[in-house]
């Protein structure tokens, strides 16, 4: 089984930059997107053979998540039970036979860190949510987590300490999640791989020089890690300030 995740930074814009071609070429069984910035009436992309589950933000042109799947889920649920985040369309959960899949778009603390308190609250709620799911079966979650966890996950670590996405608070919450029994699949398989990033600033030359951050993840319950064959970063795929990532699961 192949699952792909991509923060498309607006599906309508990304479609103009090759999203449909990548979707066809990657041939994923499940394709998760974050920051779709569109409501259902604005979604023209309906690939054959896939069911679509969309969770748009109440505020138009903002946030929102979507999942395309050709494997019919047992159940579908939206949000994590907190209006502040659910009205921004940040989480979709699909239940399959052997695991839950949660598509995530974690709140950004913003440049001045003014949303730090809200972000910390979200992190606590989300961890409680996935631990509750885990009582029934393993959890796989993916998406834009808006944090580079360790110094190896960011090009210029020293100069970025304390900046949004690389604060001790955000990194600490990610560590807490791992300590609670979850595994960062890419770093588990490739513990020493450097220069592996999923987001780059739009500033000129930044992506060409690979001055990036790894802030998009596939994370799984520890009990599920033996089912993971590979965790992939499609760093050469353009169309957004993020690149897609993939997870290969043993059948």
Image (spheres, grey):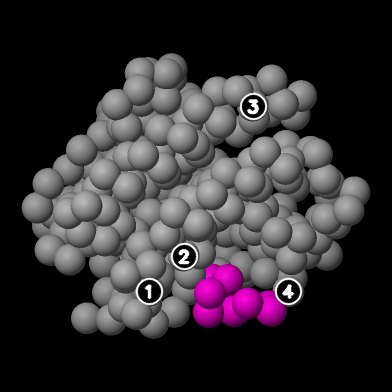
Task: Give the mark nearer the N terminus: 4 vs 2.
Answer: 2
4 or 3: tag closer to the N-terminus: 3
Q: What label sits on residue 116 in the rendered view?
A: 3
Whether pointer 2 and pointer 1 mark residues with C-beta atoms closer than 8 Å, the reply is yes
Q: Helix, strand, or loop for circle 3?
A: helix
In the image, which is nearer the foreground, mark 4 or mark 1? 1
Q: Is residue 44 visible?
A: no
Look at discs 4 and 3 and give the one toward the viewer: 3
Image location of residue 236, percent across then percent down: 62, 69
Query: Which residue was labeled with disc 1?
Result: 225
- Observer-side mark, 4 or 2, equals 2
State the residue lying farthest toward the front. Answer: 179
Residue picked out by circle 4? 194
- Give the SS element for disc 4: loop
Is residue 24 or residue 76 the one in the foreground?
76
Q: Residue at x 12, y 57 (%)?
A: 72
Q: How far, Cα to Cα, is label 1 from label 3?
A: 31 Å
Local crowd at mark 3 within 10 Å, few (<14), some, or many (≥20)? Answer: some
Q: Position of residue 48 (x, y in %)?
A: 19, 58
Task: Estimate the spatial distance between the alpha carbons at disc 2 and disc 1, rounded to whole Å.
Answer: 7 Å
Based on the displayed image, in which of its 4 quarters is residue 56 positioned?
Answer: top left
Residue 64: where, in percent of width, then height?
Answer: 41, 33
Compare residues 13 and 63 and report the one nearer the observer: 63
Q: Left or right: 100 with respect to 157?
A: left
Which residue is under mark 2?
A: 183
Quadrant (top left, top right, bottom left, bottom right) of the C terminus: bottom left
Q: Helix, strand or loop at disc 1? A: helix
Q: Looking at this view, is 14 or 155 the one in front?
A: 155
Crowding around mark 1 (Cα neighbors within 10 Å: few <14, some 14 to 19, many 20+) is some
Tell me which segment is drawn in magenta.
186-193
Residue lying at 88% horizontally and 53% vertically, measured from the top left: 158
Residue 83 within the segment the image draws in magenta = no
């Amino acid at each position: 089984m192949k699952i792909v995740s991509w923060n498309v930074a607006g599906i309508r814009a990304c479609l103009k930059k090759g999203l449909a071609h990548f979707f066809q070429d990657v041939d994923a069984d499940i394709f998760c997107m974050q920051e779709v910035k569109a409501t259902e009436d604005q979604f023209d992309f309906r690939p054959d053979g896939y069911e679509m589950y969309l969770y748009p933000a109440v505020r138009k042109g903002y946030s929102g998540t979507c999942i395309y799947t050709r494997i019919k889920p047992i159940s579908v649920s939206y949000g994590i039970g907190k209006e502040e985040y659910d009205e921004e369309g940040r989480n979709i959960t699909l239940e399959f036979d052997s695991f839950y899949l949660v598509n995530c778009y974690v709140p950004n603390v913003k440049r001045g860190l003014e949303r730090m308190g809200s972000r910390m609250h979200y992190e606590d709620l989300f961890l409680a949510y996935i631990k509750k799911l885990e009582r029934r079966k393993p959890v796989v979650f993916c998406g834009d987590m808006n944090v580079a966890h360790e110094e190896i996950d960011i090009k210029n670590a020293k100069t970025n300490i304390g900046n949004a996405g690389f604060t001790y608070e955000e990194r600490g919450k990610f560590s807490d999640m791992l300590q609670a029994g979850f595994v960062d699949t890419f770093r588990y398989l490739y513990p020493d791989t450097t220069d592996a990033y999923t987001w780059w600033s739009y500033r000129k030359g930044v992506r060409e020089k690979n001055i990036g951050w790894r802030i998009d993840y596939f994370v799984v319950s520890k009990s599920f890690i033996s089912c993971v064959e590979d965790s992939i970063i499609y760093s050469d795929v353009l169309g957004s300030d993020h690149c897609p990532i993939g997870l290969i699961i043993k059948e």
